[in-house]
């Protein structure tokens, strides 16, 4: 009876097809003599660049998270400062053949010069739960991080780089965002202050949450329907950002068509109602934002006639308190809902 051959290992052999120039990978079982006994082919049709990238990546220490990957790629501060984009599609392309990276917490504070961040959670094994972008130039970059689980811990990032920044950079011009620059810095700071205080406990406080345009009925709906923390936070921030949208529309309307207090009151009512952005759009009178931009530019150069149209705006202190009062002083008693689980 022929003696059974002793297999000692499985190794990977890479060869180049002389005709096509492509690389082929083979897994082979090796016996004690070193002679191949069996083999299975995996023909990826790689070009040399992609194969070299895969080979280089596969020999690195096991990296599980996106943070570990970035730390490994850019270990020194000077390396991080040279990075211009952080994109999951590009990262996965460089890691072809390897397991997807995990998300979790991500700290990008040292990447001072990055101007393109695209961190799609669908391209990660697990979603991101927090992103720290403190100190990065908000006006410079394009930031996009869908399909992640950014809850209360990610509020600052979500507000600064998604809900607030989209107005500042005039992405949706049809809403009159060119007038964003006329909103007073102090007014935006009040909204931002409310955002940064939002947490797992006080979102259920009917007085506090009324600043986000959430009344008793909406609060009960949120508690019942929004089971995921990330979804809840997104809804609350989107609701508050409608107040910025209302400001942009009123400023635009005043410059193009003059003051209409009755209409402005309706706009502010919608801004303080639950998810009222679709109706808000209907109130924008001047659809040609180039015309609005010309008027805004005149205001910024101290045009007295236009400046006179921007006095006693409906979101200044007394009017704002009136809106909050209308929401919080309901006839029925508002009960504090159970804590978010």
Image (cartoon, helix red, strand yellow):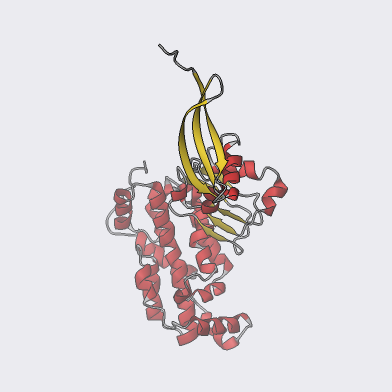
Q: Position of residue 2 (x, y in %)?
A: 43, 13
Q: Quadrant of the C terminus?
A: top left
Give the answer, above or below, for where 257 lies relative to 273.
Answer: below
On screen, residue 73 versus residue 193, left or right, reads: right
Q: Position of residue 257 (x, y in %)?
A: 45, 87
Q: Quadrant of the N terminus?
A: top left
Identify the residue at image location x=67%, y=42%. 75
Give the answer, above or below, for where 305 lies relative to 149.
Answer: below
Q: Position of residue 168 (x, y in %)?
A: 54, 68
Q: Nearer the viewer, residue 35 or 243?
A: 35
Residue at the farthest right position: 78
Q: Nearer the viewer, residue 79 or 255?
A: 79
Residue at the farthest front position: 1
Q: In which quadrant of the rendered view does residue 53 lie?
A: top right
On screen, residue 276 versus residue 40, left or right, reads: left
Residue at the farthest top position: 1
Q: Is residue 333 visible?
A: yes
């Amino acid at each position: 009876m022929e003696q059974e051959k002793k297999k000692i290992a499985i190794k990977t052999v890479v060869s180049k097809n002389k005709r096509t120039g492509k690389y082929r990978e083979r897994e082979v079982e090796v016996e004690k003599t070193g002679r191949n006994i069996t083999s299975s082919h995996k023909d990826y049709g790689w070009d040399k660049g992609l194969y070299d990238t895969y080979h280089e990546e596969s020999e690195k220490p096991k990296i599980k998270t996106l943070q570990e990957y970035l730390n490994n790629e850019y270990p020194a501060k000077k390396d991080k400062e040279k990075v211009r984009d952080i994109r999951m599609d590009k990262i996965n392309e460089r890691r072809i053949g390897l397991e997807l990276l995990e998300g979790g917490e991500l700290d990008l504070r040292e990447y001072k010069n990055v101007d393109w961040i695209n961190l799609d959670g669908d391209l990660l094994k697990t979603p991101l739960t927090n992103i720290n972008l403190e100190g990065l130039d908000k006006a410079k970059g394009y930031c996009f991080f869908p399909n992640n689980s950014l809850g209360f811990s990610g509020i600052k990032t979500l507000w600064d780089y998604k809900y607030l920044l989209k107005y500042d950079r005039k992405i949706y011009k049809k809403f009159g965002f060119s007038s964003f620059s006329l909103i007073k810095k102090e007014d935006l700071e009040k909204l931002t202050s409310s955002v940064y205080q939002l947490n797992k406990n006080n979102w259920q406080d009917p007085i506090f949450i009324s600043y986000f345009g959430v009344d008793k009925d909406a609060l009960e709906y949120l508690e019942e329907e929004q089971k995921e923390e990330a979804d809840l936070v997104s809804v609350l921030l989107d609701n508050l950002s409608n107040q910025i949208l209302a400001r942009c529309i009123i400023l635009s309307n005043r410059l193009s068509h003059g003051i209409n207090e009755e209409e402005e009151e309706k706009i502010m009512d919608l801004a303080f109602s639950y998810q009222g952005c679709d109706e808000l759009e209907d109130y924008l009178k001047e659809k040609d934002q180039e015309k609005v931009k010309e008027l805004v530019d005149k205001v910024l150069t101290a045009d007295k006639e236009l400046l006179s149209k921007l006095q006693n705006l409906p979101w200044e202190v007394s009017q704002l308190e009136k809106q909050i009062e209308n929401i919080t002083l309901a006839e029925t008693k508002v009960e504090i809902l159970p804590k978010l689980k």
